[in-house]
Amino acid sequence: IAGFRVYRIPLIRGWRRWNAVVYGLGGIALLVWLRRRYDLIHAHQLHTSGLIASFVHHLLRTKRTIVKNATGGTHGDVRHLQRMLTGRSVDVFARCVDQFIGVSEETVAEMHVAHLAPAVLVPNGVDTIAFHHPSADVRERMQRRIGVHDDRRLVLLFVGRLHPKKDVQTIIDACGMLT
């Protein structure tokens, strides 16, 4: 895709729990098979690809491993990892990762508390030129487009999946308190 070779681990529809095993074993096998083609493993989440990357790091001993903590809080990566592993297993995991990355001060702090270190802050990039507060003109035009005719009316847009980790219920509850 776009000049990059893409490897996909096939998953089986309806095999929800087994697919975690298939993904884990497939990821390990793929990284071991391709080991001469890469020098660094960058994993996007602690509890999924991070576990796979740390296991391969432990097996091969020559690959540097960076693992990014993608989400924080009650449903975040650290909490999920701690539910999956016991205290001693978390220590082994931490020793098999060269660098942890957090996307916010919160995620970095959570990793430090869980002894997942060294952890550094690398925030998600946002183009502040493209994404900025709209001018009054643009705001008024958009309000008309979505049918809002009162400037004092609160308009809230949520874009994301309806998953407990997104905590949409808090937004709904907070809006109810505003009336």
Image: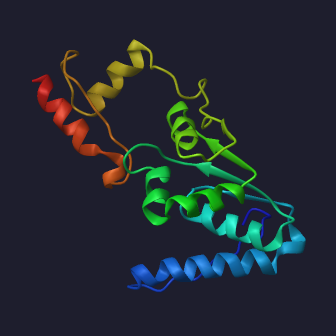
Residue at image location 54% in from the left, 48% down from the top: 70
Left or right: residue 119 versus residue 14 is right
- Among the 4 quarters of the image, the one containing residue 169: top left
- Among the 4 quarters of the image, the one containing residue 17: bottom left
- Given residues 97 and 103, the one toward you in this image is 97
Figure colour scheme: rainbow
Measured from the top left, where is residue 146 in percent x and y?
26, 34
Q: Say how many tags the image has.
A: 0
**Quadrant including the N terminus:** bottom right
Left or right: residue 91 versus residue 113 is right
Eyeballing the image, is 62 above or below 158? Answer: below
Left or right: residue 137 versus residue 10 is left
Work out which residue is located at the far front of the displayed protein and give it: 88
Measured from the top left, where is residue 177 in percent x and y?
13, 27
- Given residues 93 and 128, the one toward you in this image is 93
- Given residues 177 and 141, the one toward you in this image is 177
Residue at image location 41% in from the left, 85% down from the top: 15
Work out which residue is located at the far right of the displayed protein and give it: 36
**Quadrant including the C terminus:** top left
Left or right: residue 140 versus residue 76 is left
Measured from the top left, where is residue 92 in percent x and y?
65, 61
Residue at image location 75% in from the left, 62% down from the top: 2
- Given residues 174 and 160, the one toward you in this image is 174
Residue at image location 78% in from the left, 78% down from the top: 32
Measured from the top left, where is residue 49 in percent x and y?
61, 64
- Among the 4 quarters of the image, the one containing residue 62: bottom right
